[in-house]
Image: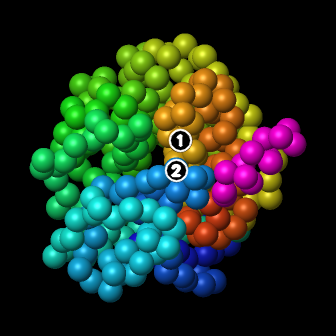
Amino acid sequence: MDYVVRSANLPRPGQTIIASDVARLPGGKGANQAVAAARLGARVSLFAALGEDEAGRWLRCVLVEQGVALDRLRSSPRPTGTAFIIVDDAGENEIVVSPGANGDLSVQDDRFDDFDVVLAQLEVSARVVDDVARRTSRLVLNVAPALAVDPETLGRCAVVIANENEAELLEVATIDHLVISLGERGARHLCRGREVARASAPHVSVVDAVGAGDAFCGAYAIRYAEGASAQDALDFAVTAGSLATQARGAQGSLATREEVEECLARR
């Protein structure tokens, strides 16, 4: 669940600012990435936990409407996880996350080796991520929020995705496949510190960058599952991420596959 407020500028430490409006929107990195992949045509199942509260019930309905399967979704007595987001007039944002129900998520007898790709992020516990990494060789891990991750867990990942801030916490030269998103400057794919692919971003008018990273991750995971080259996967992901900045909200702005491919064809 996302609570989004808008202001002319992002606050400095200790500063109080006035927001122009506030909105409650469907969100959460896992849910956003699942919806992004589904919008692009993939069959998606979400492994996560939602509270038994009104927010959890609403999000279940939203996910079903977006074509995400809930067969692996868990219920928790804890409140549904929440993100508090400030967006400025330039579309930049600051985010604080309370994991809530996702803090109760655990891997039990779940299997992950029957998926073409498993996309994970760090709004679930490090223990869950490591358990999943031990059960599939096709884990794409988005290291967001920016937290330290056990190098052994990273070593089990097929691909690690980070933005520039998140990449500063990583030993870049030790990671087999690291994709670094650069915002409006595109993205890079590194193999143990050596660049093997780079993609530029299409020029778009940015309205709201919230969810752009999740769109990027969902799109990259699809092309990875399809066996695309590093360059093709990067081009597709950068385009999907850029298109997601043109409307407000993390999920309402996500592009379809047709829209991404049309944008790629024009470049």
- Quadrant in which residue 194 is drawn: top right
Q: Residues within 10 Å of mark 2 (few under 14, many from 20)?
A: some
Residue at the far left: name it: 108
- Picture coordinates of residue 231, whole percent (x, y): 65, 25
Q: Are marks 2 and 1 in contact (CB under 8 Å)?
A: yes
The residue closer to the viewer here, 146 or 51, is 51
The amino acid type, in three-letter code, at marker 2 is Ala
- Nearest the viewer among 73 and 106 is 73
Percent of width and height locating residue 25: 50, 76
Q: What residue is shown with label 2?
A: 42
Q: Main secondary structure of the magenta part?
A: helix
Q: Can see residue 98?
A: no
Classify 10 Å Cα crowding around label 1: few (below 14), some (14-19), many (20 and above): many
Q: Compare residues 144 and 159 and report the one nearer the observer.
A: 159
Say which residue appears at 43% left-offset and 32% top-offset. Answer: 160
258 relative to 81, above or below? above
Please tell me whether mark 1 sits on a helix, a strand or a loop.
helix
Residue segment shown in magenta: 255-267
- For mark 1, what is the residue? 222
